[in-house]
């Protein structure tokens, strides 16, 4: 299985040396305090392997009792597909997103105790039926840089719906008196949503009708759509953008 994944990534290997920056350590002492993911071995010891210095194997350590929650978009591994160069190479995997370290962790079915982290490259995509993960270096319409892994919920010709999951650590609350109770620190993950149009710039939006009316008001057909439909969820937005794309092509 290890040889298979290197075959899948062969077309990305040469790009990795140029595009991958050294892996930055997450802020301390948080990762050390929660155990985190500790590298235990190189992915492959074969001399001359082009991905050897980038790909590492990780194994769980236990999160101490004083921390609650987690920093994964979905804690459990879920079926997905690793895609290189829009389909030149593919591999079925189990995957989950670590929002704290901004990494997609994968498992190869037969190696249930090992977690693999691949280079953060724009030509590697992690696909699920509902969405896909892609690495980008982007800017907002206010010229603010937003880098890392994004979820692609919808990819149209004129507009895309992306989100950036971010891990949030709420500080512990220590008792101020004997009547107070200790409250451990808590991890949670929040998604920040963006529209990406033909300009290549991100526009942050909330999942509400007001924001999309403002951004898509050039299309007259949308006025009637907003009158007939409520926007409350990602699924609602995807359905709305499909309608928007269809009528953009007809106009």
Image (tube, rainbow, N blue to C red):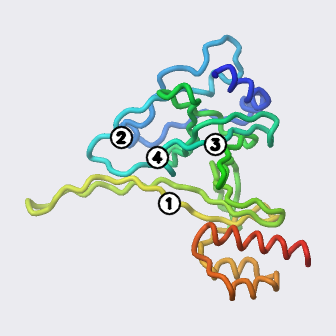
Residue 192 coordinates in the image, percent (x, y) = 57, 63
Determine whether label 2 and label 1 are within 8 Å by CB: no
User: Secondary structure under badge 1?
Assistant: strand
Residue under numbered circle 3: 80
Crowding at dot 3, Cα within 10 Å, few <14 / some 14-19 / many 20+, comes out as some
Q: Which residue is mark 2?
A: 34
Q: Is residue 31 above or below residue 143?
A: above
- Disc nearer the start of the sequence (3/4): 4
Say above or below: 89 vs 242. above
Q: Nearer the viewer, residue 119 or 176?
A: 119
Residue at left offset 63%, top offset 27%: 54
- The earlier-in-sequence mark between 2 and 3 is 2
Of marks 4 and 2, which one's residue comes earlier in the chain? Answer: 2
Bin the neighbour count of mark 1 within 10 Å (Cα to Cα): few under 14, some 14-19, many 20 and up: some
What's the mark number on residue 13?
none
Earlier sequence position, callout 1 versus callout 4? 4
The secondary structure type at the circle numbered 4 is: loop
Which residue is depicted at the point 37% across and 36% down? 35
Q: Position of residue 177 (x, y in %)?
A: 10, 61
Q: Residue at x 74, y 35 (%)?
A: 90
Work out which residue is located at the far top of the displayed protein and give it.
47
Q: Between tags 4 and 2, which lies in front?
A: 4
| Secondary element at image label 3 | strand
Disc number placed over residue 190 in the picture, else none: 1
Image quarter of the C terminus: bottom right
Q: Nearer the viewer, mark 2 or mark 3?
A: 3
Residue 236 placement, left or right of 84? left
Give percent across and percent down for residue 18.
74, 32
Where residue 75 is drawn, which disc sits there? Answer: 4
């Amino acid at each position: 299985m290890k040889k298979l994944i290197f075959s899948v990534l062969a077309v990305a290997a040469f790009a990795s040396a140029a595009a991958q920056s050294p892996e930055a350590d997450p802020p301390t002492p948080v990762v050390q305090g929660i155990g985190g993911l500790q590298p235990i071995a190189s992915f492959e010891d074969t001399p001359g392997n082009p991905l050897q210095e980038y790909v590492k194997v990780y194994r769980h350590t236990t999160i101490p009792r004083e921390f609650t929650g987690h920093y994964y978009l979905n804690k459990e591994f879920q079926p997905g597909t690793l895609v290189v160069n829009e389909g030149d190479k593919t591999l079925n995997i189990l995957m989950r997103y670590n929002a704290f370290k901004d990494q997609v962790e994968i498992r190869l079915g037969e190696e249930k105790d090992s977690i693999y982290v691949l280079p953060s490259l724009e030509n590697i995509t992690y696909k699920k039926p509902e969405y896909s993960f892609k690495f980008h270096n982007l800017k907002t319409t206010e010229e603010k840089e937003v880098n890392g892994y994004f979820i692609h919920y919808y990819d149209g010709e004129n507009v895309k719906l992306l989100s950036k999951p971010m891990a949030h650590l709420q500080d512990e609350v220590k008792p101020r008196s004997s009547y107070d109770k200790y409250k451990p620190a808590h991890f949670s993950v929040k998604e920040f949503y963006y529209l990406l149009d033909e300009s290549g710039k991100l526009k942050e939006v909330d999942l509400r009708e007001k924001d999309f009316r403002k951004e898509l008001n050039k299309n007259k057909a949308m006025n009637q759509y907003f009158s007939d439909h409520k926007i409350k969820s990602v699924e609602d937005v995807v359905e709305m953008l499909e309608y928007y794309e269809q009528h953009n092509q007809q106009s």
